[in-house]
Amino acid sequence: MQLDRNWKLVMTSFFLSICFVFLSERTIAQDTNITTSQKWSLDSCISYALRQNIQLKINELGIQNSEIALKQSKNDRLPNANGSISHNYNWGRSIDPFSNSFVSQRIQTNNLSLNSSVTLYNGSRLTNTIEQNELQVEADKLNYGQSENDLKLNIASNYLQVILNQEIKQNASRQKTSTQAQYDRTEKLVQAGVLPRANLYDLEAQLAADEQQIILSDNNLMLAKLQLRQLMQLPATESFDIVVPKVDDPSAVLDSKNPYQIFQTAETTQPNIKGADLTIEVAEKGVAIAEAGRIPTLSLIGGAGANYTSNQKTRFDPTNRSITIDTLGYIPDVAGLPTDYVVSPDIEFGTEKFGFFDQLNESFRYSLGVSLQIPIFNRFQVDNNIQRAKIQAQNAQLNSKLVRTQLYQTIEQAYISARAAKASFEASQTRVKALEETVRVMQKRLAAGAANSTEYTVVKNNLSVAQADLLRAKYEFIFRIKVLEFYEGEELKF
């Protein structure tokens, strides 16, 4: 009976384990399918990256650390309280801490104390520290916002790179399809004796070159996806596809945009500018805190304590006494008989137990007072702290100017790059149209035998290069326009 029960228990456990493993693997597979089958839009890429980016998480911890520092600076205005308990043994000649008498025996002593103090005035150091930490929290949040903006721009750039490589791959596939169609037509003409077979060899070489271009573009596409996925810090998946938005040809009018006007707008909205200005205020508060080191500090202090000693386990009890009278003599009268007696009373008092808590209650004491600490000479520490704080303030001011200069340079470079991309895009459009017409004419001439396959291959390769250049110029122009619009306060979207 017991064996059957154990066997049933083993089989039940085994069955449940199998079910658990099966369900776990199915759940993992479902999660993987969700991840791998999902198509990522620009918004979803940015949202995921903002949640997963390690540097942003480090910045979040920095904000939390600043908030704790702010909380502590506010708590520094509260009184402190510290207790102390000691247990000691003394041998030889020592002073009884309870009776202050000398003893020459081993005694056990306990000291209990409670002390508290609160700062009444210290040159507004506490107030300035609170204000400085409040500014630091805001500055850290703005720096976090700037890191978000940088990440968004990087995601958008890599996202467009994926779209660009997809279009280049599609263009390479179209080129191969076109070459294959031309090869089929030429093959028929060769079989009919209209064209020499050498034309087929050139087209076969072109087909191989087109296939090589497809392989190269596919590899570039995988690399672009890998870079985007790594920037998002997305775990490796079987596939990673993005949503390809409809991106029209750029037609933004750059003549209406002015780099300085864009900078003036960005100066009021970009987090790094606001953060740099707040850093100046943080440094100025640091100067005020350092200068407070020259001002006296006034504090209110208080304390309480009690003692115990093993040398005082008993104490005098005035309520417990016994009186005995000793006759010292008598006063005689004329006849020599005693008329009165001279006596000496002998009073003996008893003792009572004087335990631990009785001694604590008897020796309890407390104190209250004020303390004024006046800085006179501290090896020039205060002066050096003030000088360091002023240097930090100057550094913050220079850093604010540097951030503004870098922002203007970035906007100016983006504007110039946008103008160059626009010119390149317009020139590429003209070039592609001309080469498309050239290829069309060349196809007719090749079919009529007025041109050879080598001439056709050269023109077709020129068209392929021009189309790739057009795509690059197109997306370079789009990205530069998006950068300028982003600094103007618009959202990143296509």
Image (cartoon, rainbow, N blue to C red):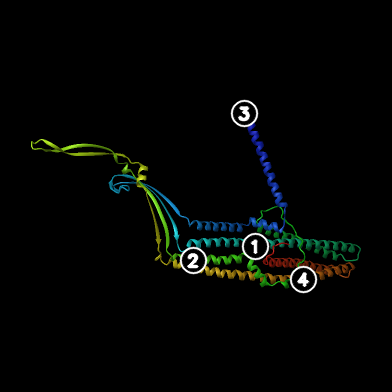
As measured in the structure, the alpha-carbon distance from the residue carrying label 2 to the one carrying label 3 is 83 Å
Q: Residue at x 59, y 59 (%)?
A: 59
Quick one: SS at disc 2? helix
As measured in the structure, the alpha-carbon distance from the residue carrying label 4 to the one carrying label 1 is 30 Å
Dot 2 or dot 4, earlier in sequence: 2
Q: Which residue lies furthest to the top in this view?
A: 1
Would you identify the image quadrant in which residue 356 lies? Answer: top left
Please indicate, yes or no, whether residue 156 appears anywhere in the rendered image: yes
- Which of labels 3 and 1 is toward the front? 1
Looking at the picture, which amino acid does disc 4 mark?
Glu
| Horizontal arrangement in the rendering, residue 263 relative to residue 190 (left or right) | left
Write down the residue under mark 4: 426
Q: Residue 254, how many percent across, how many down?
A: 73, 71
Disc number for residue 149: 1
Write down the residue under mark 2: 288
As measured in the structure, the alpha-carbon distance from the residue carrying label 2 to the one carrying label 1 is 33 Å
Q: In this view, does 41 lie above or below 471?
A: above
- Which of labels 2 and 1 is toward the front? 2
Write down the residue under mark 3: 3
Dot 2 or dot 1, earlier in sequence: 1
Work out which quarter of the rendered image holds the N terminus and state it: top right
Q: Is residue 6 above or below residue 133?
A: above
Give the class, few, some or many, for how many residues have Cα within 10 Å of label 1's Cα (few <14, many ≥20): some
Dot 3 or dot 1, earlier in sequence: 3
Quick one: SS at disc 1? helix
